[in-house]
Structure formats: structure tokens, C-alpha cells
Amino acid sequence: MVSLDKEKNDLAANIDEKVKAREVEFRSKLQDELEAEKKRLADQGLSSAAMQARIKSFEADRTAVLNKQLADARESAEAEKPRQTINSISSKKNNNRNMAGLGEERKRIQDEVAKTRG
């Protein structure tokens, strides 16, 4: 049971890491988009005040989109946890069955060897 609990915790940590990586990716993309928008607005020759107002609006819009994407990524990751846990348990059960079968096969071979020597 301890092993299963540890594996569940490892899966959760792995999913959390993926979500954090996704957040970093989204934030980096937002920064790139902000820089591109600032350049685009500067190239239009807008006043500093007009640029700041548009950038503020652009950033609010893009941040809302980013937050929605992050929420979706978290929701997806949370939905993935039970499936990964089930897959892990199933894999362990298969491994245990295989090990039991190998043990039986080993015993059969040992019995055959004992018969040929005996």
C-alpha cells in the first residue's frame, strides 16, 4: 500500500510539474505578445498615453485568455490523475500476474530437473 500511495503522490507531482511548465510557457507567450503589440503601436506613432491605454487593455484581454487556458490545463490534468492511477494499478496487477506465472514456470522446470536427476 505504501508503494501505491507513493506512486499516487509521484503522479500528482508529475501532473503539477506539467501544469507549472504550461503556465511558464503561457506567461512567456504573453510577454512576447505584449512586446510585439508595443512595437506595433509604437510604429503607428501613437502618444505614450494612448499606447499605455491600449497596452493595458491588450494585456487584460490576453491575461484573461491565459487564465482560461491555465484553468483548462489544470482541469485536464486533474481529470488525468484517476486514469493514470488506474493504469498504474492495472500495470502492477499485470506484473504481479506475470511474476506469479514465472514462479510457477520456475517451479515446473525445477520439478522436471529433479525428476530427470532422480
Image (spheres, rainbow, N blue to C red):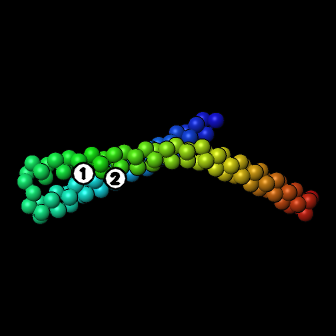
Measuring 34% from the left and 46% from the top, which residue is drawn there? 64
Residue that badge 2 annotates:
26
Q: Amino acid at mark 1?
A: Phe
Which residue is painted at 16% across and 57% down in the image?
Answer: 38
For image coordinates 34% across by 52% down, the residue present is: 26
User: In the depicted view, which residue is nearer to us: 4 or 47?
Assistant: 47
Tell me the residue that label 1 is attached to: 58
Q: Position of residue 78 (x, y in %)?
A: 52, 43
Graded by Cα atoms within 10 Å as few (under 14), some (14 to 19) or many (20 or more), the crowding at tag 1 reads some
Element marked by disc 1: helix
Residue 39 in the image: state x and y as whole percent. Answer: 15, 61
Query: 40 above or below 26?
Result: below
Q: Residue 65 vs residue 56: left or right?
A: right
- Drawn side of residue 17 relative to residue 82, left or right: left
Please state which amino acid type lies under the numbered disc 2. Phe
Q: Residues within 10 Å of mark 2 (few under 14, many from 20)?
A: some
